[in-house]
Image (cartoon, rainbow, N blue to C red):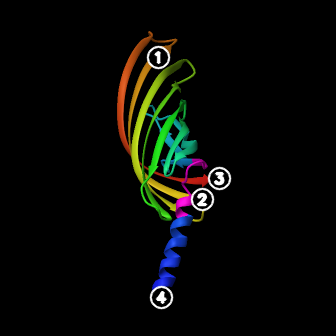
Amino acid sequence: MKKILTLVAVLAAFSSVSFSQTEKGKIFVSGSSNLNFTSRQEQVTEDDGTEKELSITHFNIKPSLGYFFANNFAVAISFNYELNKEGDYKYREALVGPMLRYYILESNIKPYVQGGLMFGANKIRYNAAGECKENVFRWDLGAGVAFFLNDYVSIDLGLGYSSVSKESKYDDDEFEVFNESRDINAIAFTGGLTIVF
């Protein structure tokens, strides 16, 4: 009988701790990434025999600030910043938008589902003369698991689907101006950290 009472007491304490992590009124800050940071140097030989060194950098981060308006249900404002640089080619993207996240279980391991919209722009510089500006609209759906290390910190691992629409205007001193629309669909693995206050 003592073992059963001890087990019930431990489970009750565990569930009250895990519920307090995502309860109504809490605020959270999180940061995630597609875990693809690259920085490398390459030696390139062109068709005419010219050799040059090429520096390549890729980086992506997505911080969010959110509020639990109901137990396990949060609304957030998310930001996305991406940088790609390869020699003379430079791509920068900045997006912002709302996100909803719902945590499913009452434990220290909490599966979640989320969705969001993002709006913004990017700038692509091809060389000293050419530049492209794009308006960007993106929506995301995803699911994952938050591993709460304590009442305040979780490590988040997820899988998400993104659909991105871009409208471009390319302007180059050597070529004519043209417009372009593109739709991009992608699946990505993400990892991140969440701090709950």
Residue topped by disc 4:
3
C-alpha separation, residue under disc 1 versus residue under disc 4: 72 Å
Q: Residues within 10 Å of mark 3 (few under 14, many from 20)?
A: few
Query: Is-magenta flag for residue 26?
Result: yes
Q: Of discs 1 and 4, which sits in the foreground?
A: 4
C-alpha separation, residue under disc 4 versus residue under disc 2: 31 Å
Are the residues flagged by discs 1 and 4 in contact, CB closer than 8 Å? no
Q: Position of residue 165 (x, y in %)?
A: 39, 27
Considering only order in the chain, which callout, 2 or 3, is on the residue closer to the N terminus?
2
Q: Which image quarter holds the N terminus?
A: bottom left
Considering only order in the chain, which callout, 3 or 1, is on the residue closer to the N terminus?
1
Q: Position of residue 173 (x, y in %)?
A: 52, 11
Please report the residue visible at 46 percent of the width from the left and 59 percent of the height from the top. Answer: 110
Are the residues flagged by discs 4 and 3 in contact, CB closer than 8 Å? no
What is the number of the mark on residue 170? 1
Q: Left of 191 or right of it: where is 128?
A: right
C-alpha separation, residue under disc 4 versus residue under disc 3: 35 Å
Q: In the rendered structure, which amino acid carries the disc numbered 4?
A: Lys
Q: Quadrant of residue 141?
A: top left
C-alpha separation, residue under disc 1 versus residue under disc 2: 44 Å
Are the residues flagged by discs 1 and 2 in contact, CB closer than 8 Å? no
Residue numbers of the magenta segment: 18-30
Q: Could you say which is closer to the camera, residue 137 or residue 39?
A: 137
Q: In the rendered structure, which amino acid carries the disc numbered 2?
A: Val
Considering only order in the chain, which callout, 2 or 1, is on the residue closer to the N terminus?
2
As helix, strand or loop, the secondary structure at mark 4 comes to helix
Q: Residues within 10 Å of mark 1 (few under 14, many from 20)?
A: some
What is the number of the mark on residue 153? 2
What is the number of the mark on residue 197? 3
